[in-house]
């Protein structure tokens, strides 16, 4: 019994010690982006994950290294759902200090490159059912930085979003674009600036969300920024008696 306890203690210590370096190495190998973390704890038996102080930086061929700063990431997942058709996360809390999107004169943005490397080049067959479900989600985002180096004169803008939203039963990215999120983007004049930094499919999700909540297909003919402004105008009209 004593031997088993000692072996278990040593194994747990090794797991806690090696996990942060294994995680950052996996991020670099898969995406090409460097990563650092202050602490990381994961229990494979309970599905509890807790991460603090995550910093992801762009590859050296980007004019700015800033990419992502996360204060905290906490999740409680259903371990057994890994063996089913849909991965289920009971609760998820993400506290983001800053996201920096970077456009270069040539090549994809940092978001496009990170996503392409993470997903891989092999196309996945479409499925009618989502591959994940988040029962409860809290998302906080303090600041968004848009750094455009595609022109001769670089342009860097910082938007203090201060978003703090709660969601339930999330199974697709489009569900995150509720009225409060869309209104916040429109009121801070972020939408028109943000669109050029997004992959085409991301822009489509944003437009569809705005169109669906505005109740007008005519908005699809507008520019991405105008979709959000039109959506905000309709929200204001509904408030009037």
Image (spheres, grey):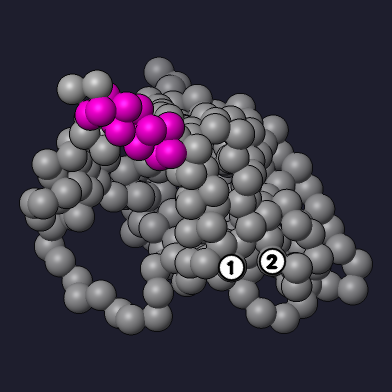
Q: What residue is at 8 percent from the left and 51 percent from the top?
A: 84
How far is disc 1 from disc 2 in space, using C-alphas? 7 Å
The residue furthest top is 241
SS category of the residue bearing label 2 = loop
Q: Residue at x 66, y 79 (%)?
A: 107
Residue 225 pos. (x, y %): 58, 54
Q: Which residue is mark 1?
A: 32
Taking the magenta stretch, the answer to whether it contains residue 187 is no
The circle drawn on residue 59 is 2
Q: Main structural element of the magenta stretch: helix, strand or loop?
A: helix
| Figure check: 192 above or below 49 | below
CB of mark 1 within 8 Å of CB of mark 2?
yes
**Which residues lie in the magenta part?**
3-15
* Residue 199, x across and y down, in percent: 51, 68
Q: Residue at x 56, y 62 (%)?
A: 28
Q: In which image quadrant can residue 204 be found?
A: bottom left
- Asked which quadrant contains residue 208, the reply is bottom left
x%, y% of residue 68? Answer: 62, 47
- Verify whether residue 8 appears in magenta: yes
- Left or right placement of residue 194 versus residue 207 in this view: right
The kind of secondary structure element at disc 1 is loop
């Amino acid at each position: 019994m004593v031997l088993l306890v000692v072996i278990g203690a040593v194994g747990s210590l090794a797991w806690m010690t090696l996990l942060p370096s294994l995680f950052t190495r996996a991020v670099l190998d898969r995406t090409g982006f460097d990563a650092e973390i202050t602490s990381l704890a994961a229990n494979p038996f309970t599905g509890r994950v807790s991460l603090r102080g995550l910093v992801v930086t762009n590859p050296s061929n980007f004019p700015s290294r800033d990419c992502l700063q996360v204060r905290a990431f906490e999740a409680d997942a259903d371990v057994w759902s890994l063996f089913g058709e849909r991965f289920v996360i009971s609760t998820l809390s993400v506290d983001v200090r800053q996201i920096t999107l970077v456009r270069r004169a040539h090549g994809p943005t940092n978001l496009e490159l990170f996503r392409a490397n993470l997903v891989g080049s092999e196309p996945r067959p479409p499925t009618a059912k989502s591959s994940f479900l988040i029962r409860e989600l809290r998302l906080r985002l303090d600041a968004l930085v848009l750094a455009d180096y595609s022109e001769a004169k670089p342009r860097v803008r910082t938007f203090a979003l201060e978003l703090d939203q709660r969601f339930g039963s999330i199974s697709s990215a489009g569900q995150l674009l509720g009225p409060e999120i869309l209104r916040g983007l429109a009121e801070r004049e972020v939408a028109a600036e943000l669109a050029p930094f997004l992959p085409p499919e991301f822009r489509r999700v944003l437009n569809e969300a705005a169109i669906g909540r505005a109740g007008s297909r005519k908005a699809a003919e507008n520019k991405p920024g105008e979709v959000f402004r039109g959506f905000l105008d309709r929200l204001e009209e509904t408030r009037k008696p």
